[in-house]
Amino acid sequence: MANIVRWDDPFAGLTNLHSQLDDMFNNMFSGMPTAQATTAAPSMDVYTENDKLVTEVQAPGFTKDDVDVSVHNGILEIKGEKHEKEEEKGDKKQRSYMLRESHASFYRRLRLPDYADEDHVDATFDNGVLKVTISFKDLPKPKKIAITGGKK
């Protein structure tokens, strides 16, 4: 009769240690942002106010020079792109960055309703909020149609 001998994997401890180290490093750096370019779309509100279509885009960290607004063929396009400027050398303190994001961009498109007037668009940028206001066209009034005929 053969005896059954229990065999323990000599590498099981290393696999477990490897897993624990992975967990430790993932937890340590999970709160830190990644070093890739930011391309997340900023939040956008679209509403009507005083017979105008209003679009507000939250773009903190951007300036009006970083943002382009265009309207073409019924599409409102909003693009934002910024690059960090090089630091001046000289008597400035030397910085040691752990992370430095030097590029950010976003792109939003919105199909406009048929009654939006592409010739009357205003855009303002204040405290990181882009506000685009588009007037409505004067739409023809509905015509009352008389109903005739029929049996009583």
Image (cartoon, rainbow, N blue to C red):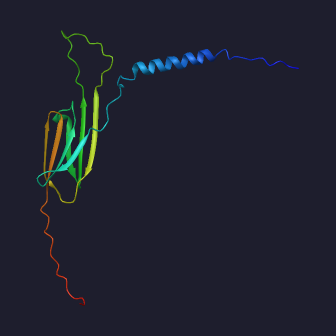
Q: Residue at x 49, y 20 (%)?
A: 22
Q: What is the quadrant of residue 90 in the picture?
A: top left
Relative depth, front residue between 85 and 12: 12
Relative depth, front residue between 44 and 101: 44
Residue 68 is situated, as x and y percent measured from the top left of the image, at: 20, 41
Q: Residue at x 28, y 26 (%)?
A: 102
Residue 131 is situated, as x and y percent measured from the top left of the image, at: 16, 42
> In which quadrant is the C terminus drawn?
bottom left
Q: What is the quadrant of residue 115 in the picture?
A: bottom left
Q: Residue at x 22, y 57 (%)?
A: 113
Residue 27 is situated, as x and y percent measured from the top left of the image, at: 43, 21
> In which quadrant is the N terminus drawn?
top right
Residue 85 is situated, as x and y percent measured from the top left of the image, at: 22, 24
Q: Residue at x 16, y 45 (%)?
A: 132
Q: Is residue 73 above or below residue 40?
A: below
Q: Is residue 27 above or below residue 43?
A: above
Toward the bottom, the furthest residue is 151
Total numbered badges shown on the rendered structure: 0
| Side of 21 relative to 146 (left or right) | right
Toward the front, the furthest residue is 152
Relative depth, front residue between 46 and 39: 46
Q: What is the quadrant of residue 137 in the picture?
A: bottom left
Q: Is residue 52 above or below residue 130?
A: below
